[in-house]
Image (tube, rainbow, N blue to C red):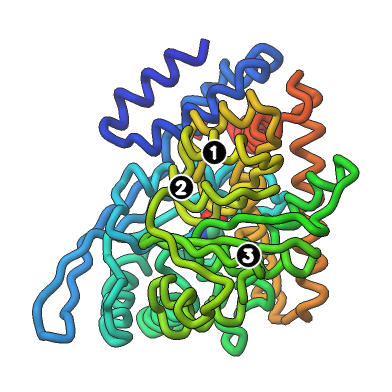
Amino acid sequence: MLQPIYDEILGRNPGEAEFHQATRELLDSLGPVVARHPEYTDAGIIRRICEPERQIIFRVPWVDDAGQVQLNRGFRVEFNSTLGPYKGGLRFHPSVYLGIVKFLGFEQIFKNALTGMPIGGGKGGSDFDPKGRSDAEIMRFCQSFMTELYRHIGEYTDVPAGDIGVGGREIGYLFGQYKRITNRYESGVLTGKGISWGGSLVRTEATGYGTVYFANEILKNAGDSFDGKSVVVSGSGNVAIHAAEKVAALGGRVIACSDSSGYVVDEAGIDLDLLKEVKEVRRERISAYAEARGGSARFVTDGAVWDVPCDIALPCATQNELDEKHAVALVGNGCAVVAEGANMPCTPDAVRVFADAGVTFAPGKAANAGGVATSALEMQQNASRDSWSFAHTEERLEQIMIGIHARCLETADAYGAPGNYAAGANIGGFIKVADAMLALGVI
Ligand code: GLU
């Protein structure tokens, strides 16, 4: 029954492999929903939900430090505004094209719905490569990007934030240019802002912390905990670093992490202060961590970080980074829980290997929702011109993650897939948006 819808998606969106993958993953879960709710089909909900409300593509010209004109392409896909303003990050990475932005925007619809916060789904970015660029070049690029984007966003319309390649520095330059062009101090137009100019405490830590809170709920549900567990985290950016920090706080030991050049194994447990210094201050490759740490750490370029034996795996780097052979290696080494800190890091074949082996798998749209949920808390603080303490904000984040975990399990149970977090997240997120779309009519 859903095959014709998938065929329509393929025909309408040629060459967008990641978008096809993300829609297929959702459609694969919706069989029992369609059977129980003919009203969704009658109102064309699934077909409409797979078509973005608006897609914006624009030229981003800028001048580099050598005085040369550079050219990039900018995107903002405003996917679904049923539950609130479009909400989702901006990614600056050379791999960005429309298919990546659409997959991310699509995931964001259901992730944001699962948080229970009033936010729609969207995503944007550019094929700009920030690697090796000076601060001044980053600023000029961000200013040019915002010179077009500003006309499409607003606190009631579309609220971007960061993603890969976009952190506090970039949000600062983007916000500065928005403020200058519009002559409005509209704090709620972007999230991930600095603390002194409208940001929220915990936003930086939120995606990584949230993923670990989610994994912790999985463990608690099985009468277990992080205490004494060995954990492998992929990536070494914002999500990976803060996931590792929370694992350590809960008594686990993160023994490996990676970047695109290779991975480090540190049996003594990753030294997070050193990792932050290498990646966030010096902005160097991860081999610099092993060099500085000496003794207990080694840098490896063969194979993948998933070859390191662990109890729990947290893929926190990027899409499709963990494939079938990596999943087989993890299963063979006794890994029992996989929670996605990144968006769609596990390929469909890898997810199948986990399911067959009885490994508990938590999909990103549930397990990494803590970042965007805390963005929604930042919007709340901006709207009330207030700022909350770290402890209060973190408590809200933890409660949201506990809520998402419960919703996934309850929904999976109710639709005949007990213990299946992917089905629970897909169905739970979908139904929330679908019911609201029904109420709003054919728009
Ligand atoms: N880029 C993050 C995500 O994938 C956060 C988006 C946001 O805070 O709006 O969910």
Q: Residue placed at 45% from the left, 66% from the top?
A: 299
* Residue tagged 2: 104
Q: How far apart are marks 3 and 2 (CA)?
A: 34 Å
Residue at mark 3? 267
Q: Reading the chain from its start, which is encountered first: label 1 or label 3?
A: 3
- Image x and y of residue 221, in percent: 86, 42
Sequence-wise first label, 2 or 1: 2
Disc 2 versus disc 1: nearer the observer: 1
* Residue 115 on image: x %, y %: 70, 50
Compared across the picture, whether 437 is left or right of 287 comes to right
Specify whether tag 2 is near ligand 1 (CB below 8 Å): yes
User: What residue did someone put label 1 on?
Assistant: 329
- Which comes before the other along the chain, label 3 or label 2? 2
Mark 2–mark 1 Cα distance, whole angstroms, equals 27 Å
| Residue 112 seen by the camera | no
Compared with residue 27, is residue 59 higher up or lower down, i.e. above or below? below
Which residue type does callout 2 highlight? Leu
Q: Position of residue 165 (x, y in %)?
A: 40, 67
